């Protein structure tokens, strides 16, 4: 596959894709000898689309990355940011001026901890301020579950087969003298695997500002 890709333009696969071209190719039962650049690009587009759809459906970011988020303070000791699991924290700011530029408002790493199964950030000797735009986190998060990756494989396969049979948008298909219904919605097997990971608000808050790096 690497040799084929080297002959064409760079890969269009997202760095946050939930599966790989290899995994989808195996799921489709396509031998490596049948791969060509057009097929690789088709699979990459499918993976990107299905990965984005899964993230939208679950409201989660699974592949590890860093986010910068600003919240309203709530006067609590613990705060649940948008994404989990929290892998590490680079910065915690408490600043009622909303500027986040004065180093005095940036906490030392000894002043907070990751708690509650890596879902919350707890202040050890103080509370978050009760003020709007007063809390800023820079943190790394994410872990790709095996079933989410496999659900992406299955979704890619389902779309690939649907397109291959030219069934997209078709409600029925002839089979001999019979008319067979065509399933146009994502199979329940796939949605059930995805929905297990759908966002649950652990008493968390919606960020005023969020940047994923």
Image (cartoon, rainbow, N blue to C red):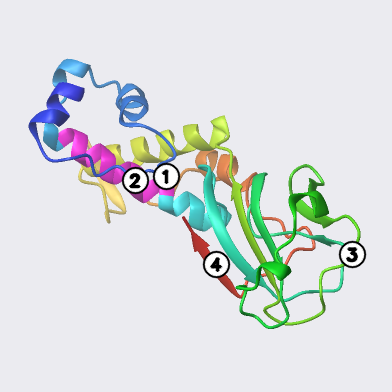
The reply to whether residue 1 is visible in this rendering is no
Give the vertical position of 128 relative to 151 (above or below).
below
Assign the magenta stretch its main secondary structure. helix
Label 1: few (<14), some (14–19) or many (≥20) C-alpha neighbours in 10 Å: some
The reply to whether residue 11 is visible in this rendering is yes
Q: Earlier in the sequence, mark 2 or mark 4?
A: 2
User: Residue 126 at x, y = what percent?
Assistant: 89, 64
User: Residue 173 at x, y = what percent?
Assistant: 26, 45
Residue underneath mark 1 = 16
SS under mark 3:
loop
Give the vertical position of 63 relative to 168 (above or below).
above
Left or right side of 74 for 139: left
Q: Disc 2 and disc 4: Cα gap in Å? A: 20 Å
Q: Disc 1 and disc 2: Cα gap in Å? A: 5 Å
Determine whether label 3 and label 1 are within 8 Å by CB: no
Q: Earlier in the sequence, mark 4 or mark 3?
A: 3
Determine whether label 2 and label 3 are within 8 Å by CB: no
Q: Which residue shows up at 64% across the image and 59% down it? A: 82
Residue underneath mark 3 = 126
Q: Nearer the viewer, residue 118 or 24?
A: 118
SS under mark 4:
strand
Determine whether label 1 and label 2 are within 8 Å by CB: yes
Residue underneath mark 4 = 210
Q: Disc 2 and disc 3: Cα gap in Å? A: 40 Å
Q: Which tag is nearer the camera, tag 2 or tag 3? A: 3
Left or right side of 158 for 117: right
Residue underneath mark 2 = 14
Q: Earlier in the sequence, mark 2 or mark 3?
A: 2
Q: Which residue shows up at 39% across the image and 47% down it? A: 50
Q: Which residues are magenta?
A: 39-51
């Amino acid at each position: 596959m690497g040799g084929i890709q080297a002959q064409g333009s760079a890969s269009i696969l997202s760095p946050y894709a939930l599966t790989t071209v290899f995994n989808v190719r195996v799921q489709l039962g396509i031998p490596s000898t049948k791969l060509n650049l057009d097929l690789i690009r088709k699979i990459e587009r499918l993976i990107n689309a299905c990965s984005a759809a899964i993230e939208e459906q679950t409201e989660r970011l699974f592949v590890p990355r860093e986010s910068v988020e600003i919240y309203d303070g709530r006067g609590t000791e613990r705060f649940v940011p948008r994404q989990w699991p929290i892998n590490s924290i680079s910065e915690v700011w408490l600043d009622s001026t909303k500027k986040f530029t004065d180093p005095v408002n940036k906490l030392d790493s000894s002043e907070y901890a990751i708690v509650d199964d890596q879902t919350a950030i707890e202040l050890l000797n103080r509370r978050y301020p009760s003020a709007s735009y007063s809390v800023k986190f820079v943190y790394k998060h994410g872990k790709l579950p095996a079933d989410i990756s496999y659900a992406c494989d299955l979704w890619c396969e389902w779309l690939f087969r649907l397109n291959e049979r030219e069934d997209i948008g078709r409600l029925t298909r002839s089979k001999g003298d019979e008319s067979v219904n065509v399933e146009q919605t994502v199979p329940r097997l796939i949605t059930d695997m995805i929905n297990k990971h759908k966002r649950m608000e652990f008493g968390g808050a919606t960020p005023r500002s969020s940047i994923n790096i």
